[in-house]
Every structure is written in C-alpha cells, then in structure tokens.
Image (cartoon, rainbow, N blue to C red):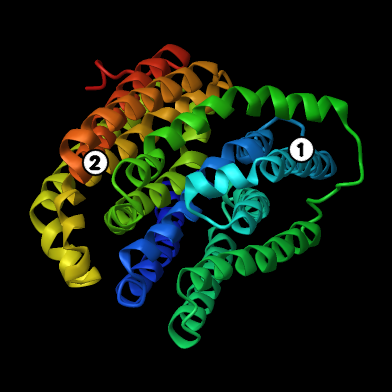
Amino acid sequence: MKGNNFINGAGIYLFSNVLNAVIPFIMLPILTRHLSPAEYGEVAMFQTLLGALGAFVGITFVGAAGRKYYDDNLSENELAEFIGSCIQLVLISSVIVFSLFFIFKSNLSEWLALKASYILFAVLVASCSVIITLRLGQWQVKKQAVKYGMLQISQSLFNMLLSLFLVVVLLKGAEGRINAQIVMSLVFVILALMLLKKDSLLMIFIWRKDYLAEILRFGVPLVPHIAGGFLLSSVDRFVINQEIGLAEAGTYMVAVQLTAAIGIVFDAINKAYVPWLFEKLKNDKYKDKQRIVKLTYLWFIVIMLGVVLAFFIGPWLVVLIAGEEYAQAGEVVGWLALGQGFQGMYLMVTNYIFFSKRTGMLSVASMGSGVLNLVLLIVLVRNFDLQGAAIAFALSMGVRFMLTWLIAHKRHPMPWFSFV
C-alpha cells in the first residue's frame, strides 16, 4: 500500500470521526441546559450499560470477521458465510443475555437507577451496534473509507436530530435522549444488514460449524479483554453513582464526553493505520519495521504534549461548553485526558497482538488493569470524590499500555530498541 493511500484514508477517517465527535459537542451545551445533572446521570448509566453489554453480545466477533479478510485464498462467498456465522452468534448471545436481564430486571433497575424496560432495551441496542460495527469493519479492511464515513456520520446526525427533537422540542428529558438511541439503533441495523446484502456479504441461513468454532476461538479469549476495557473506561460511573450519587455521575460523564474527542482522533488514525500496518508486517521487511517504530515513538511524544495542554485548558473548556452547573467536571479533565493519551499509545502496540492471532494474554492485561482500576476507584473515590475516579482511570490505563506493549513484543517482536 502506498504512503499517500494511507494518508488519504487517515484523512477520511479523521474527518468522519472528528465530525462524529463534533456532533456530541454540539449536543452537549444544549443537553446540559435542558437536563439536570441527575437526568444526565440517568443517560450516562444507560450508555455505560451499553458499553458493558458489548463484550457479551458479540463485539469480539467483529474482529474475527476483520481478521478473516486477510486470510489467503478466501472467496467472497466464504467471507459472506463467515459474516453470517458472526451474526448467528450475535443473535444467540443476545437471547441469552436478554433472558438473564429479564429474570433480574428488578434488581438491575434498582442498582442502575434505570427503568426495567430500558435495561432490556439496552440489550437490543448493544446487539444492533455490533452488527452496525460489523458492516463498518468490512469497509475498513477493504479501505473503503468514504462509505465508512457516510454511514457513521449519518448515524450520528440521525441520533443528534432525534435527541434534540425529543429533549428540546417535546421536553422528554432523559427519556427523550435514551429513546433516540433506541430508535437510531433499530433504523441503522436494518440499513447495515441491507448494505451487507447489497455487497454479497450476508449469508445468515447457513450452518458452518468450522466457522462458528473459528469465531469463538478468536472472540471468546477477547471477552475478558473487552470486559477489562469496560472496567477501565466505564465502571467508574457505576462506582460514582453508588458512592456519591446519580447527579455526580452525570457531571463526571460531561468530562468523559469532552475528553472522548481525544480518543476519537486516536481511533480515526488507528482505523487507517491498521490495514497499512498489517500489509507491512505481512511483507516482513526489517527496514519497514524500523520506520514503523520511529513513527510510533514520534506519535507518543505528540500525544503527551496534547495531554499537558488539556490540564491547562480543561476547566475553562468545561464551563464554556457545559455551563457553570457542571463546573466540577473541569477538575478531572486533565486526568481523563492522560488516560486517553495512554489509550492512544495502547492502540499503537496492540495491533501486533491481533496480527499474531494469539490474543489470550491481551485479555490478561486488560482484565488485570480493569480489576486494578476497580480497586483504585473504590479507594480513591471515597477519599477524593470525582478527582479520585479520574486519577484511577489514568493510572490503570498507563498500566494496561505498558503490559500490552510487553505482550506485543513477545507475540510479534519489533526493533523497539534498535530502530536507528
């Protein structure tokens, strides 16, 4: 792949993801002026539940489909059968999770401060999100960045406009924001399935035990990895809700959404970077590896400079965007940005593990870091309130990055110390 193709792809992904990030920024000052911190906390708990469900309704199967594309001598029909097998497993997983949630809906409703109906709808939304991501992932591996961007942006615009209509015009409060996410998911999962069918990438009514086994071999070891990621990036809202209150969880969510813009930039660059990186690794040329390492270290420096800036401008930015009622969120922006910085560095090293197909130890690193975060959260939140949660996040993300880097070097050695 030529360098200019990588730059063009990165540009499209960056534009798409930045625009995708701008949309929540546009909504944030409007929603924070129409939702109280407690109502915003309710929205935060629903979104956090969605993040938790991803690991259990099949988000890891998306990676299996993306990696399958790079197999030698793979026909289009075989890829369609593989994707169909992924969707079969998503449906099976979703039915199991829905059944468990239905049984324990009252307990979950009390613990999460959400209506029981929304807890059940969360399973549906999470399942739809996996299938939509599966459609996006196939465009990514085929380097069809424009199509990727169009669907992603359309989804965000639909979500924004419907949310604003329900919250601002109809004054539906937190219910309006949550209902918009449910409707958006249903509309776009239908569209995603239609687009997969249009590209001859959808064969659901087949039964390939070999593909089901392959998907499970790839995906199941990653479930602790995804669960660990949830413990790192989302469980803080559960702890804050339990230890401090729903309103504080809403305030913290505002800071999380502001710093999420950093993560979106990292994700955009990584989406364009992965196909280019995998091709270079497949060619297995030492000079290419040295160049990759140099670029990685340069990117690490840029990330840390951005984090330092966030500590200075974060408090001012929070008040400007969200209003004085959410000023407390400014105290944690810098620490959350540091955690996002470690996430960006983590993305640069974790790709080697996925390329090797030996993902088991990645789950150990993620789950271990996630458990560390949970322990730090309980201790630090009780002593330092919201700032304690942000510090726990930053420290745990730093530990995950270092552990993942070590595993990546074991799985696919790179000239990290001999790149000159």
Dividing the picture into quadrants, the one containing residue 298 is top left
**Is residue 298 visible to us here?**
no
288 left or right of 144 in image = left
**Vertical position of residue 160 compared to residue 91: above or below:** below
Q: Nearer the viewer, residue 173 or 227?
A: 173
Q: CA distance from mark 1 to mark 2?
A: 35 Å
Q: How many marks?
A: 2
Image coordinates for residue 156, horizontal then vertical, percent: 50, 68
**Is residue 279 visible to us here?**
yes
**Vertical position of residue 155 compared to residue 42: above or below:** below
Label 2, residues with CA under 10 Å away: few <14, some 14-19, many ≥20: many
Q: Which residue is mark 2?
A: 390
The disc labelled 2 sits on which kind of residue?
A: Ala
Q: Nearer the viewer, residue 401 or 81?
A: 401
Q: On the rendered image, what quadrant is the C terminus found in? A: top left
Q: Which residue is mark 1?
A: 89
**Residue located farthest toward the right when viewing the structure as drawn:** 206
Dividing the picture into quadrants, the one containing residue 325 is bottom left
Residue lying at 64% horizontally and 69% vertically, measured from the top left: 183
